[in-house]
Amino acid sequence: MIDYHCHILPGLDDGCRDLAEAVEMAILLVDAGFTCVHCTPHCITGLFDYPIELIKDAVRDLQEVLNAAGIPLQLKVGMEYYVDELFFERLENPLTLGDSNLLLFEISPTASFNLLKEAIFQIRCRGFIPLLAHPERYPTMMPGSKSAGFLRRFIYNALPTDTLFFEKFPPIVKEIIDMGCLLQGNFGSFSGVYGQEVQRVANLHQKQDHYKYFGSDGHRVRQLRKSLCGIEQVWQFDNIA
Ligand SMILES: [Fe+2]
């Protein structure tokens, strides 16, 4: 099993604080059945902004520590890009997930749908595959959510099945999937780490088979432990990579 989204590199972003915590997180992941994890620190202008070479060095250093400790976890490089004022410039030479063409990115919950579509379009224009992190955490993208407007919420509750609702009101994510954007769900969304609404929206996405990849989005040991409780809820589906 592969974790496609994890803040396990120590001392870089708001994730893992030091080497000891990184090792503890690695052990948790191995115990949960992972053999490989993509190290994906945030890339946010003015906040978490590191050269690609530094990320590669940090991955290599942590891998050496894990190897020496006999922890069987393969680390791969990555980045979680935030769509900000430098995002389009960064696309000239981005750090993708491992050897793949997958480019993991996130947007502000208040960003416009047009900005999201532009980001996807630009990623694809440069030959990369857009992978949107945790779409369930943007409830406006799912019309059955509380933030999707009263009328749609009312109709959603009135219709007998989700399938019927989505036939009549395809969610915004359907449009971005059609644009070639892939979606990465967080295990923690299924175990309620981000609250009941995100959990409900994650289940709706899953029922619609929207996810192609999953990740722990692990930041700290305690949060990672809770997030991994969501694995069983997604295991029953065949689409886990
Ligand atoms: Fe993340």
Image (spheres, rainbow, N blue to C red):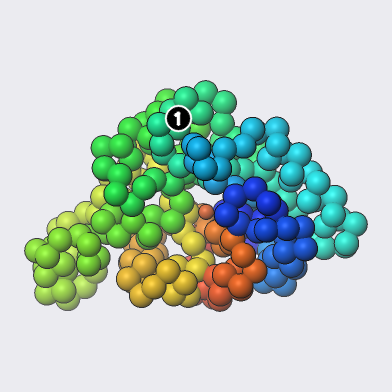
The vertical placement of 54 against 150, above or below, is above
Residue name at image x 57 percent, y 26 percent: 93
Total residue callouts: 1
- Position of 51 with respect to 238 (left or right) is right
Do we see residue 37 in this rendering? no
- Classify the position of the N terminus by image quarter: bottom right
Number of other residues with Cα within 10 Å of mark 1, as a class: few under 14, some 14 to 19, many 20 or more: few
Query: At numbered mark 1, what does the secondary structure look like: helix, strand or loop?
Result: loop
- Position of 167 with respect to 27 (left or right) is left
Residue name at image x 67 percent, y 43 percent: 77
Residue name at image x 30 percent, y 37 percent: 115
Q: Position of residue 18 (x, y in %)?
A: 73, 58
Furthest-front residue in this view = 46
Quadrant position of residue 189: bottom left
Circle 1 residue: 86
- Position of 61 with respect to 233 (left or right) is right
Q: Position of residue 50 (x, y in %)?
A: 62, 37
Name the foreground residue: 178 vs 155. 155
Q: Position of residue 22 (x, y in %)?
A: 72, 60
Q: Position of residue 112 (x, y in %)?
A: 26, 42
Residue name at image x 72 percent, y 50 percent: 75
Three-letter amino acid code of the residue under disc 1: Leu
Quadrant position of residue 206: bottom left
